[in-house]
Amino acid sequence: MTINFAPKTRLGRFSVGLISAFFLFFILFQLLIASGQRGGETFFDNLWLSIPISLAGICGISAFFTGIIGILKKRERAISIFLSTVIGFFVLWFVLGEILVPH
C-alpha cells in the first residue's frame, strides 16, 4: 500500500482547494484586523470583516463534506484529504458551537 500526499480524484482536489481557500480568507481576515478594522454590535456591522470570515467558514465546512464524500465514495486515501477533512470538521464544530451556544 502506497501513501500519497496529493489527491487522485476530482473531489479530493476540490477538498484541498477549498481548505486552501479557507486559509487564504482567514489570513485576509487577520490582515484586515491588523490594519485597524473593528467589528460592531452585530456580525454584519462591518462587511469588510464579515464577508471574508463568512467565506472562510463556508470553504472550511465545504472542504469537510467534499473530503468525507471523497473518502467514503471515491476511496480517496491521500494524506492531504484526511488533513483537509479534519480541519473542516474543526471549522464545522466551531461554527456549530457559535450558533448553538451564543455568548
Image (spheres, grey):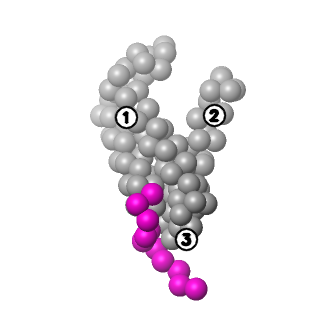
Q: Nearer the viewer, mark 2 or mark 3?
A: 3
Vertical comparison of 49 with 58: above or below: above
For marks 3 and 1, give the one nearer the viewer. Answer: 3
Q: Residue 101 at what x, y percent from top left?
A: 69, 26
Do the residues bearing badges 1 and 2 touch, measured as CB atoms within 8 Å? no
The segment highlighted magenta reads: 1-11
- Callout 2 secondary element: helix
Q: Earlier in the sequence, mark 3 or mark 1?
A: 1
Q: Secondary structure at mark 1?
A: helix
Give residue 51's quadrant in the image.
top left
Which numbered disc flags the more N-terminal residue, 2 or 3? 3
Q: Is residue 21 left or right of residue 41?
A: left
Say which mark, if any, is on residue 77.
Answer: 3
Q: Dot 3: what SS?
A: loop
Q: Please identify the quarter of the rendering in which residue 29 is found.
A: top left
Query: In x, y percent, where is residue 27?
Result: 37, 45
